[in-house]
Amino acid sequence: MRRNETEAGMRDWQQRLFATFFQPQTASGRAFELVLLAAILASIATVMLESVASFRAAHGVLLRRLEWGFTALFTAEYALRLLCLKRPHRYAFSFFGIVDLLAVVPTYLALVAGGTHYFLVVRVIRMLRVFRLLKLGRYLQAGDTLWLALRAARQKIAVFLMAVLTLVVLIGTLMYLVEGPETGFTSIPTSIYWAIVTLTTVGYGDIAPQTVAGQALAALVMILGYSIIAVPTGIMTVEMGRVPRPEAGAGRACAACGAPGHDADAAFCKRCGARL
C-alpha cells in the first residue's frame, strides 16, 4: 500500500513539475517563465559587463558570484526538466535540451581548463555562455509562423537573390569601366563590393566615384536600392498572411519528451509518438 501511495505521490509531483516547466498556460507555468526570462536576460547582461575591463576590475567578485548563481539556477532547471519527463533522453537530445546544457557547461569547463597557459582557452569557453540567448527561443511563439512563411517563400526569395547578384555584377563591371583604377575602382570585384554597399544603402564611403558619369550611375543605384529592399518585405508579408493561425488551445506539451506545440485534438506526440 505504501509503495503504491509513494508511486502515486511521485506521479503527482512529476505532474506538478511538468505543469510548471512545460505548460506556460498554467499559473505556475506563467510565473516560472517570467522568472526564467528575467534570469536569462540578467545572465546575459552579466556576461557583457564582464567583458568591460574597468567594470570587471571594480566588480569582478560580484560578477563571478552572479555567474555561479545563474549557473546553479540553470543547472537545477535542466535537471528538474529531465526529472519530470517519462522519456528524459528525448528532451536531452532535442534543440532546447542541448541549448539548456550549453547554458551551464561552459562555466564548469572553465574550472577544468585552469592554469595561466590556458587563459585564452578559458576566455573562449566562458564566452560560450552567450548560448543562453538561444534559451530565449522558447518565448518566440511567432517564430513558427515566420519559419513557415520563409519556407513557403524560399523559391521566390532565391529568384530575387539571383536577380540582385546579377544586378550587382553588371553595375560593378559598368562602374569599373566608367571610373577605372585611378579613383579607387581597381578591379571588378572591388567595384562589385562598392555596388553591394551602395545598393543595400549601407554606404561606407571608402570608395566613391569621381566622374560625372560615375556619380550619375551611383545616384541611380542608390534610388534602386530602396525599391529592392521593399521586394523581400512584400514577399514575406504575403506568405505570412497565408500561414494558418493556430487553433485555440493549441500548444500542448508532451509529458514524455517535453515537445511543445501540439494541436488541441492531437492524440500522439509528433516527436516521440507517446500518447498525449
Image: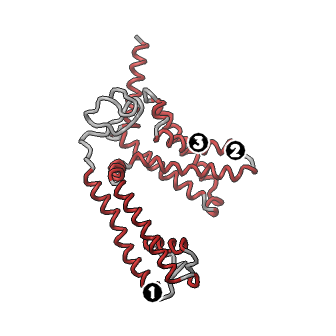
* Residue appearing at x 41%, y 28% in the figure: 14
Query: Which disc, if any, is residue 213?
Result: 1
Dot 2: what SS? Answer: loop
Dot 1: what SS? Answer: helix
Q: Could you tell me the amino acid type at mark 3?
A: Val
Query: Which disc, if any, is residue 160?
Result: none
Q: Could you tell me the amino acid type at mark 2?
A: Ala
Residue marked by disc 3: 105
- Relative to the observer, which residue lies in front, 225 or 11? 225
User: Horizontal and vertical percent for residue 81?
Assistant: 46, 34
Q: Is residue 123 rendered to the left or right of residue 208?
A: right
User: Horizontal and vertical percent for residue 69?
Assistant: 56, 45
Task: Select label 1 or label 2 by which is in front.
Answer: 1
Dot 3: what SS? Answer: helix
User: Horizontal and vertical percent for residue 23?
Assistant: 35, 37
- Relative to the observer, which residue lies in front, 182 or 43? 182
Mark 2–mark 3 Cα distance, whole angstroms, equals 12 Å
Q: Badge 3, how many Cα within 10 Å: few under 14, some, many 20+?
A: some
- Relative to the observer, which residue lies in front, 4 or 177? 177
- Relative to the observer, which residue lies in front, 21 or 55? 21
Above or below: residue 259 compared with residue 199: above
Residue marked by disc 2: 113
User: Horizontal and vertical percent for residue 76?
Assistant: 51, 37
